[in-house]
Image (tube, rainbow, N blue to C red):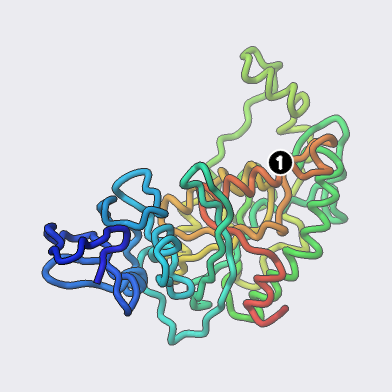
Amino acid sequence: MQRRGVCRPAGQGWGLRRRAGQILSDAGGPHIYSGKGREENLSVLAAAGLPRLSLQRRFLSQCARLPRELYPLEHLLREVRGSRLPAGRAVGGRGGGAEPDMSQPAIRLPVRYYRALPIDRPGHEQELFEIPKSQVALVGMHCWNIGCADGPPVDLNYCVDLGWPQATVEGWRIIREVIRPAMDACRRAGIAVCHIETDWMDAQYPELPSRRAALPPYTPPQTLAGQMAERAHGADYLRRSPLAQMKRAAIVSPVGDEPLFFYTDQLHEYLKQRGISTLIYVGFSTDMCVLGADGGARSMLGLGYRCVLMRDGTVGVETPQSFPERLATRYGTHLFEWQVGFSTTFAEFMTALGDG
């Protein structure tokens, strides 16, 4: 037997003591010495949900470039030949760390993420998640009805919602052609559908608890920050723009007992009670609210949820200049795939549900 990346001189012993974390290889494939006289198959360790291993550089293949002693297990498994991760467990059991109960009906969802390391050869990586339906929720984020048939018209004197007309039209198309069909497919499949909105529209939903303070009487802003906000959005935009009359678009509003929340902790409590650990995000906008608003992916990642963006179920705040190449959308998707979680497509999601 030889340690990968270490040659044994003819007629000599290894001259080194085994330590936990050493990579070994034989006819059965790569193994890792876990201490206490045991060797573990790498895929077994992956299935156990171990996200990182402390590895010793000199016992790794030379192709495995390590930027630090703690090395992501999923990267190692791609770089040591013969290793393999079980489908759906490639990231060490995110979203709580527990092994999924595969006795329940499950979906097999292809996803991708952006691998940053090593920085001289980054790129997208593909994974396949196998997840019980009971542990998945579709989260519809900030699906406003500005410019929709049931909502206030676009006001050209205010830059709100998705900003400019091109992105607003595209957002309405996505609501009709992607988000609503995805919601209906989840309902048929028994997957939870959750709705997240901003408390800016609390006046339209008086039955929902709101923590937003009442707006004081309007006065022209005296601070630089207030002046910049009005320059960006329009004078007195919180009272006079379409934001003041908007609701959630009727076509993607809650059905039956589906929840509508304003705040992260409300969504968390609902998901926790139901054992949901994986969130599929659709809605708006890719580069702002989906990432950073209450109930958005960054806050839910911080609470331990595995987050997946449906990358054709969203659009960013695009200017007329950026819209043709979807620059804001693509950058928001990149941030999500790099720092927050994973992405999939509408077609892949529908196929996973058996609805494609």
Q: Quadrant of residue 283?
A: bottom right
Residue at x 83%, y 34% (from the top left corner): 321
Image check: 287 left or right of 33? Answer: right
Question: Please, which residue is most extreme toward the top here?
Answer: 222
Q: Nearer the viewer, residue 144 or 185?
A: 185
Whether residue 50 is visible to the viewer of this picture, yes or no, is yes
**Residue 242 image point, x, y percent:** 79, 40
Image check: 49 left or right of 331? Answer: left
Q: Is residue 336 above or below residue 179?
A: above
**Residue 274 image point, x, y percent:** 45, 71
Q: Quadrant of residue 55?
A: bottom left
**Residue 177 image point, x, y percent:** 80, 65
Residue at x 31%, y 62% (from the top left corner): 4
Q: Amino acid at mark 1?
A: Ala
Question: Please, which residue is most extreme toward the bottom here?
Answer: 103
Whether residue 259 is visible to the viewer of this picture, yes or no, is no
Residue under label 1, please give it: 328
Q: Quarter of the image containing the C terminus?
A: bottom right
Image check: 241 left or right of 84? Answer: right
Q: Nearer the viewer, residue 314 or 233?
A: 314
Residue at x 59%, y 79% (from the top left corner): 190
Q: Secondary structure at mark 1?
A: helix
